[in-house]
């Protein structure tokens, strides 16, 4: 007996982790955090050792991210003030404060 697929019936495709990494270039921990916050499609278990994502949901998420990016509505990380960091502090430069540079000595 053959199963006939109607136009309104869609075939569900799932992707495994390595395929997800090819589609979404984010670290596993970032994807996990997004899933926990409900900002990324949830994974589900096909078996005790096989975790997958719904490909259509991932593609919809990517499309939404692109749309938000085009609208400049994506939350972006703030630019850090490097003068406040404790490790590798920024050295003050002599430029712009009347100091001499190598170009001045030549």
Image (spheres, helix red, strand yellow):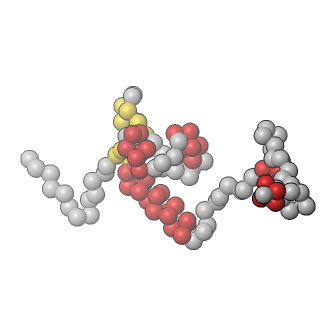
Question: Residue 96 placed where, x, y %?
Answer: 86, 62
Q: Residue at x 43, y 44 (%)?
A: 21
Question: Residue 103 placed where, x, y %?
Answer: 77, 58
| Residue sitting at the far right | 98
Q: Residue at x 52, y 39 (%)?
A: 28
Tell me if residue 36 can be seen.
Answer: no
Question: Residue 10 placed where, x, y %?
Answer: 28, 57
> Quadrant of residue 89 in the image?
top right
Please say if 32 is above or below 8: above
| Residue sitting at the far bottom | 71
Q: Residue at x 78, y 40 (%)?
A: 88
Q: Residue at x 84, y 53 (%)?
A: 93
| Residue sitting at the far front | 106
The quarter in which the C terminus is drawn is bottom right
Question: Residue 82 placed where, x, y %?
Answer: 78, 50
Please say if 51 is above or below 78: above
Relative horizontal placement of residue 10, taking residue 33 as reference (left or right): left
Please say if 68 is above or below 99: below
Relative horizontal placement of residue 19, taking residue 104 as reference (left or right): left
Q: Nearer the viewer, residue 4 or 55?
A: 55
Tell me if residue 104 can be seen.
Answer: yes
Q: Nearer the viewer, residue 73 or 5?
A: 73
| Residue sitting at the far top | 48
Relative horizontal placement of residue 61, taking residue 52 as reference (left or right): right
**Circle count:** 0
């Amino acid at each position: 007996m053959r199963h006939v697929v109607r136009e309104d019936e869609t075939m569900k495709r799932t992707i495994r982790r390595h395929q997800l990494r090819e589609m979404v270039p984010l670290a596993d921990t970032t994807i996990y955090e997004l899933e926990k916050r409900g900002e990324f499609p949830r994974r589900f278990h096909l078996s005790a050792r096989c975790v997958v994502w719904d490909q259509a949901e991932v593609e919809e998420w990517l499309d939404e991210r692109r749309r938000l990016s085009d609208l400049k509505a994506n939350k972006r990380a703030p630019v850090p003030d490097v003068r406040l960091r404790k490790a590798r502090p920024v050295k003050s430069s002599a430029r712009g404060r009347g100091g001499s540079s190598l170009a001045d000595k030549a």
